């Protein structure tokens, strides 16, 4: 009799735990869907054209921020690691999203207007 009671209590406990877990997953999904945001990289200062970005990354000049998805520029950098080994082809301004179109590989000629 005691064995049946223990087994019943275990099943009830598992059922309650499973329902709680499912409820938490559903709530987390609802919260993430309501945010509708996107992480992008912005500069904390003006960066002139022809500037290598590796020293600025080390200095913390390039930071990841959350923006509304509808505000993202085409080709916006979404991870600071994408900037490694790159330099600017055009100026990047303070708090501006950094688009890939304004960057070039550091091994290419890194000067304004170079492609």
Image (tube, rainbow, N blue to C red):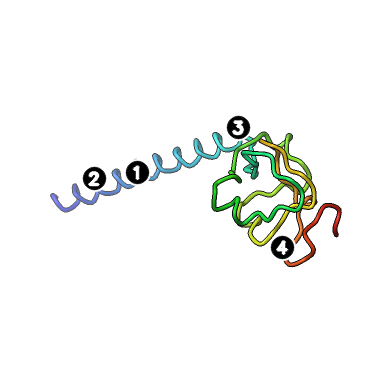
Residue tagged 4:
106
Q: Disc 1 designates what residue? A: 17
The earlier-in-sequence mark between 1 and 3 is: 1
Indicate which disc, 1 or 2, sits on the residue closer to the N terminus.
2
Give neighbour class at mark 4: few <14, some 14-19, many 20+ (Cα, 10 Å).
Answer: some
Q: Is residue 33 above or below residue 87?
A: above
How far across and down, in percent of the image, does residue 12 sit? 30, 43
- Callout 4 secondary element: loop
- Name the foreground residue: 36 vs 16: 36
**Labelled pair 2, 3 in contact (Cβ < 8 Å):** no
**Mark toward the start of the polypeptide (4 vs 2):** 2
Which mark is in front, 2 or 3? 3
Left or right of 89: which side holds 96? left
Q: Residue at x 39, y 45 (%)?
A: 18
> Dot 3 corresponds to which residue?
34
Q: Nearer the viewer, mark 1 or mark 4?
A: 4
Task: Give the residue pinned by disc 2.
Answer: 9
User: Disc 1 and disc 4: Cα gap in Å?
Assistant: 54 Å
User: Which residue occupies 65% across, 42% down?
Assistant: 42
Q: Residue at x 79, y 63 (%)?
A: 109
Among numbered discs 2 and 3, the one appearing first in the sequence: 2
């Amino acid at each position: 009799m005691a064995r049946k009671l223990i087994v019943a209590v275990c099943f009830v406990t598992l059922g309650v735990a499973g329902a709680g877990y499912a409820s938490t997953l559903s709530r987390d999904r609802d919260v993430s869907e309501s945010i509708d945001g996107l992480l992008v990289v912005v500069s904390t200062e003006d960066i002139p054209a022809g500037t290598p970005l590796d020293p600025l990354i080390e200095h913390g000049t390039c930071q990841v921020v959350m923006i509304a998805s509808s505000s993202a520029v085409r080709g916006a950098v979404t991870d600071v690691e994408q900037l490694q080994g790159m330099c600017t082809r055009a100026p990047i301004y303070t708090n501006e999203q950094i688009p890939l179109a304004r960057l070039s590989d550091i091994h290419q000629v890194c000067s304004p207007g170079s492609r």
